[in-house]
Image (tube, helix red, strand yellow):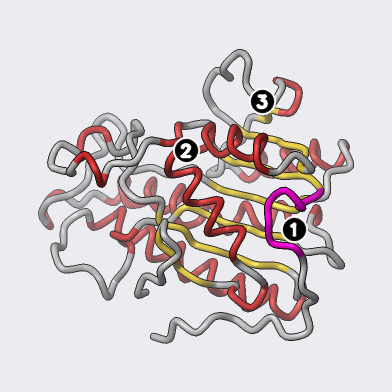
Amino acid sequence: MSSTPASGAGAPEEPQGLEHWQGDALVVGGGGIGLALLEALAQRAPGLRLWATSRRPWPAGSVVPPERVLDLDLTDDSSLEACTSRLQDEDVRLRLVINTAGLLHDGALQPEKRLQQLRRDSLQRLFSVNAYGPVLLARALEPLLPRQKPLHFASLSARVGSIGDNRLGGWYGYRAAKAAQNQLLRCLALEWERRLPLACVSLLHPGTTATALSEPFRRSVPAEQLFTPERAAHHLLAVIAAQTPAHSGRFLAWDGTLIPW
């Protein structure tokens, strides 16, 4: 499977530094990485008006005021439609969207270690959030995307979603759902190359980060390989800022290197 990026022929160059970016930015997911990205964007991209979505209580003193925090459930079409409608009412034109929402474990839902642990309902939940959620988010937000200005749509994937790099097995549902997300957003990148030629779609692996998602599984991770949310956000924004429409559809690690599909 080729890792050649989608072509961005004809797209004008623009300053890549985040300090030059103008417009609205939406960060989906109010977990550790999402909050850190908002803080970093407030410092590094002052020309962006920040919006957020969260399904948990919003922290006091956040760089995003409560009136710009939307409730959003990626598994619910009516919630996606309501989010789009609210942003349209605010005359939002999105320059940047970063989806950080993901599901790995939740109560009885745990990564499978062997075949007999697979359950249909667990697979459906994992795919609904990790695979279908990001591309349905893109569909919902498409009316808010500019046609004549650059835009970036990024979603957190995971190295374990790489088929070519899978040497351990296990984690059937999460691996497969992230691999499906990669394919869906690769298709999106190719479609937007034709319809929104200034768009760039990126799939990003943030590295193992000290968040609630990774907490049960990181005891064996060396300290130097475990990132704080702030460090992960710094890396992710650096990778995003370096991408252009010519790079749309790539699956990238936190340091900007290509990950095999």
Q: Looking at this view, is 118 or 222 the one in front?
A: 222
Residue in the image at 37% along x and 49% along y: 126
Decide: few, some or many residues near mark 2? Use Cα within 10 Å; few <14, some 14-19, many ≥20: many
Q: Amino acid at mark 2?
A: Ile
The image shows residue 111 at horizontal and vertical percentages of 22, 46
Quadrant of residue 27 in the image?
Answer: top right
Q: Which residues are magenta?
A: 15-22
Decide: few, some or many residues near mark 1? Use Cα within 10 Å; few <14, some 14-19, many ≥20: some
Whether residue 16 sits left or right of residue 58 in the image: it is right
Lower position in the chain sequence, tag 2 or tag 3: 2
Q: Amino acid at mark 3?
A: Val
Q: Looking at this view, is 79 or 261 the one in front?
A: 261
| Spatial CA span between label 1 and label 3 | 25 Å
Q: Amino acid at mark 1?
A: Glu
Whether residue 242 sits left or right of residue 234 in the image: it is right
Q: Secondary structure at mark 2?
A: helix
Q: Which residue is mark 1?
A: 142
Q: Are marks 1 and 3 in contact (CB under 8 Å)?
A: no
| Spatial CA span between label 2 and label 3 | 14 Å
Q: Which residue is mark 2?
A: 33
Q: Which residue is mark 3?
A: 63
Q: Secondary structure at mark 1?
A: helix
Q: Main secondary structure of the magenta part?
A: loop
Residue in the image at 64% along x and 40% along y: 41
Q: Looking at this view, is 54 or 223 the one in front?
A: 223
| Spatial CA span between label 2 and label 1 | 24 Å
